[in-house]
């Protein structure tokens, strides 16, 4: 049998080593090529800072407050016989709410009427006695002392009759108090006392009525903002040039606008704010049926008050999504002529009624390019590849009733 030459195994090992060396050289060549090829600048979408007509507005937290509020109480002491209203319903001025036990008061009125009738009869007799005494005074049988006594008796009975009539009137008033009626138009709350209970003037509030239409919204404004607001509207006709809108707790915009009618005369020492107030219409909802009339604004409700100018002004605007926030405040990324992204601090002005636009008071110029898309891929001073955003958000078609989106903070 022939043996294979031993050198063939060595040839195989040598060839395998050459293959590994060639692969390593190729890998090193590819890695070097990759390191030599420069990285492409990150692509970003930009929008131009534009001058647009906007209506400056400021948002505040306010509370709905009824113009009139009445606590219904008993004015005489008696048993409560009957209640005539539906809790939570609206009542009219003069509507009967409660009826108290009337028997004792009617009896008292009749007793006082009898006393008045008695004094009236005595007074008539005194008038006749005085007339006879004066007639006899012209004869020898008449005496002046008799006339004086008759006159004194007549005057005394007149005074007693006036007192009896006053007591009768007081009894009639107390009888009227047994019927407790609504002093104002408004919505009545729950009753605190039910029929059969004994009530007195010290029993407390039986029910509360609050007026419904119109209604107030009261909101505190920081003193610095109030001063700036007064300066802003001084040349536009004062506070009457401002329009008050209300955003309801569900985020929707109330369909009625109001006007400021009160500025408090004292600044709160605790909060350094001053209270402003506006009146708004509060009509019943079209779907309201029956006694329980529903209205959009409810006394004591927390709302967002939007205080805006009556006429728009020209202002620099950028999409709200382009404005970022950190501990230092608000900022945007501006792309300069060398396509480098620079961080720019900005100061936002009065808020825009559009949730997609931000009004810039300082920090930007008209026509500058601001990064809107891809801001998470850039760093200050880095070269970028800008391209106009195809359809930047604008105030056109924006739903003013939608709540404003808060700026996104970059980590």
Image: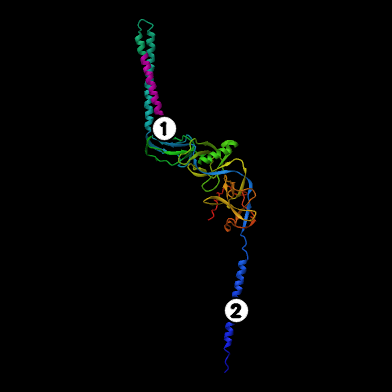
Residue range in magenta is: 151-173
**Which quarter of the rendered picture does the N terminus lie within?**
bottom right
Q: Is residue 155 left or right of residue 45?
A: left
Q: Residue 375: within the magenta?
A: no
Q: Quadrant of residue 281?
A: top right
Give the percent coordinates (x, y) of residue 320. 58, 50
Figure check: 357 above or below 210:
below
Mark 1: secondary structure: helix
Estimate how packed mark 2 is, as few (under 14), some (14 to 19) or many (20 or more) residues with alpha carbons within 10 Å: few
Q: Which residue appears at 58% of the width and 87% of the height?
A: 7
Where is residue 247 shown, x and y percent of the image?
54, 45
Q: Is residue 207 above or below residue 165?
A: below
* Callout 2 secondary element: helix
Residue 116 in sight from this viewpoint: no
Question: Where residue 308 sits: x, y (%)?
Answer: 57, 42
Q: Which residue is mark 2?
A: 19
Task: State the residue at coordinates (36%, 15%).
Answer: 153
- Residue placed at 36% from the left, 11% from the top? 148
**Disc sitting over residue 177 in the figure:** 1
Residue closer to the observer: 120 or 255: 255
Q: Are marks 1 and 2 in contact (CB under 8 Å)?
A: no
């Amino acid at each position: 049998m022939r043996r294979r030459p031993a050198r063939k195994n060595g040839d195989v090992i040598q060839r395998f080593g050459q293959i590994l060396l060639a692969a390593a050289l190729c890998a090193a060549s590819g890695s070097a090529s990759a390191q030599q090829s420069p990285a492409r600048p990150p692509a970003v979408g930009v929008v131009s800072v534009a001058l647009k007509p906007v209506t400056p507005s400021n948002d505040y937290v306010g509370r709905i407050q009824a113009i009139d509020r009445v606590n219904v109480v008993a004015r005489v002491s008696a048993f409560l016989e009957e209640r005539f209203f539906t809790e939570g319903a609206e009542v009219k001025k003069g509507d009967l709410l409660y009826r108290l036990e009337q028997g004792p008061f009617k009896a008292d009125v009749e007793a006082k009427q009898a006393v008045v009738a008695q004094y009236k009869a005595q007074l008539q007799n005194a008038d006749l006695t005085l007339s006879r005494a004066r007639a006899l005074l012209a004869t020898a049988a008449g005496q002046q002392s008799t006339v004086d006594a008759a006159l004194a008796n007549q005057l005394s009975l007149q005074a007693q009759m006036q007192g009896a009539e006053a007591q009768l009137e007081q009894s009639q008033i107390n009888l009227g108090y047994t019927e407790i009626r609504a002093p104002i138009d408004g919505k009545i709350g729950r009753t605190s006392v039910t029929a059969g209970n004994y009530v007195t003037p010290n029993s407390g509030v039986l029910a509360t009525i609050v007026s419904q239409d119109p209604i107030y919204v009261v909101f505190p404004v920081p003193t610095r903002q109030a001063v700036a607001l007064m300066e802003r509207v001084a040349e536009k006709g004062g506070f009457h040039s401002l329009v008050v809108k209300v955003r309801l707790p569900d985020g929707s915009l109330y369909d009625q606008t109001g006007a400021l009618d009160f500025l408090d005369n004292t600044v709160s020492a605790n909060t350094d704010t001053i209270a402003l107030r506006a009146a708004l219409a509060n009509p019943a909802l079209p779907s309201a049926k029956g006694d329980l009339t529903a209205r959009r604004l409810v006394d004591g409700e927390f709302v967002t008050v939007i205080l805006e100018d009556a006429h728009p002004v020209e202002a620099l605007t950028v999409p709200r999504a382009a404005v970022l926030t950190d501990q230092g405040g608000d900022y945007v990324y501006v792309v300069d002529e060398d396509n480098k992204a620079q961080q720019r601090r900005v100061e936002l002005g009065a808020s825009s009624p559009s949730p997609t636009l931000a009004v810039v008071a300082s920090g930007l110029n008209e026509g500058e390019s601001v990064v809107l898309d891809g801001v998470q891929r850039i760093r200050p001073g880095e070269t970028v590849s800008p391209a106009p955003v195809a359809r930047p958000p604008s105030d056109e078609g924006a739903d003013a009733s939608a709540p404003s989106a808060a700026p996104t903070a970059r980590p």
